[in-house]
Amino acid sequence: MRPRTVMAGIAFQCVGAISFGALMPVTSAWSAQTAGVARSVASVAHLARPFTVLNTTPASGATGVSPSAPIVVRFSEFLSSRSPAPGLVPSTPGSWRVQGSSFVFTPSMDFIPLSDVKLVIPGGRTGISSASGGHLAGTLTKTIQIANGSIVRLQQLLSLTDYSPLRWRSVRPRLSIKNVVGQRAALFNAPNGRFLWRYSGWPTNLLALWKSGVYNVFTEGMVMSFQADHGFTPNGALSSSLWSSLLSAYQARQVNSGGYNYALENKASPQVLTIWHNGHVVLTSPSNTGISVSPTVDGNFAVYLRLRSQIMRGTNPNGSHYADPVQYVAYFNGNDAVHYMPRAQYGYPQSLGCIELPLQNAATAWPYLAYGTLVSVIN
């Protein structure tokens, strides 16, 4: 009889080497069952994971975006080939394609400068779906802004539509940008050329203001003149609608017929206002500018408001109030304007900052002091 081994009060009978072969089928069955559960859990987790937009390129809210840059919408899963494409407002020529887990838009024509482009990503049951059947919870909207165009091209277009006192000529006279795609591209990459003054009679004060490629008061004045003629508020602000209108005017050969005007107020005694139209002096008039406690500020300004007549109201330096009827009013700097004001004499400081003219001279000056006309004040 074989001895028994007693351990912690439990008797075990030694029966020789124990074989585990009989236990293997049980262990294999357990492992297969566990793997199946794991796969089921993974599948449920996959179905529970929401289908979302991870990011967009350019990012929503981005400004200064390249006009030819692709727009990419990246999702959390691969996309169904039956998904509708996102939309762009305003619509722009180009194509959408599915690229793995992304929708990619490649424009075939540059966007308009300063355009606010709205990207609409459709959601819900009829919107974009994943390859596994997931849907976005709702429609998403992202907005980006395209970069501003070339200031040189802006100046070229203002010249080509006769809002500039300078002509522009291409360095290759036969070069013509005939299609819309080329015109759009030129808004950002101006063709080479040169600017030439249309007339030889302009004063040096105006000549010194011209800067190619610089958006200063000179170019702002031309923009304001164009704005006034095309239904915009003449404030000199650049916008996508302004770029579109300017390009359309050029393509339709709509040009300015009013010529170019410039006014120069010389505060040296005796004070004189001189106005040029198309390089020729059309008015030289004695004038009054601001007294020492309320001077007419030196500088260069563009006419931004015109009134045939009004009652000017304000406070005198001594605290009294005034309400003066004036005529032929052209505001150029804040509350300062060129206008008629009845005075016994003209030619020395009498106003509170305005440039005052005799009645007949003010009537002659007013048509030339159009929106955007530059008024320089010196001395």
Image (cartoon, rainbow, N blue to C red):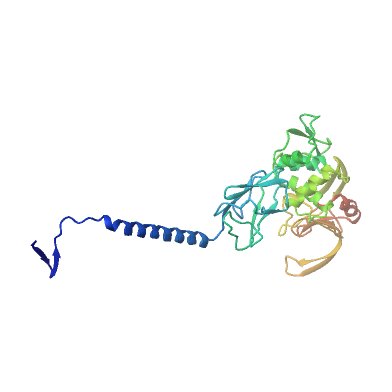
Left or right of 22 in this view: 286:
right
User: Residue at 90% across / 54% down in the picture?
Assistant: 363
Most foreground residue, 233 or 166: 233
Q: Where is residue 7 in the image (x, y as percent from the top left)?
A: 12, 66
Left or right of 352 in this view: 47:
left
Count of residue discs: 0
Q: In the rendered image of this protein, does residue 42 appear above or below residue 81?
A: below
**Location of the N terminus (image quadrant):** bottom left
Q: Is residue 361 visible?
A: yes
Q: Where is residue 371 in the image (x, y as percent from the top left)?
A: 82, 52
The image quadrant of residue 55 is: bottom right
Q: Position of residue 17 (x, y in %)?
A: 17, 55
User: Residue at 44% across / 58% down in the picture?
Assistant: 39
Most foreground residue, 338 or 24: 24
Q: Residue furthest front?
A: 1
User: Residue at 79% across / 46% down in the picture?
Assistant: 246
Q: Position of residue 92 (x, y in %)?
A: 72, 48
User: Residue at 80% across / 49% down in the picture?
Assistant: 245
Q: In the rendered image of this protein, does residue 32 appear above or below residue 163?
A: below
Most foreground residue, 204 or 195: 195
Most foreground residue, 270 or 175: 175
Q: Residue furthest right?
A: 360
Q: Can residue 270 be seen in this view?
A: no
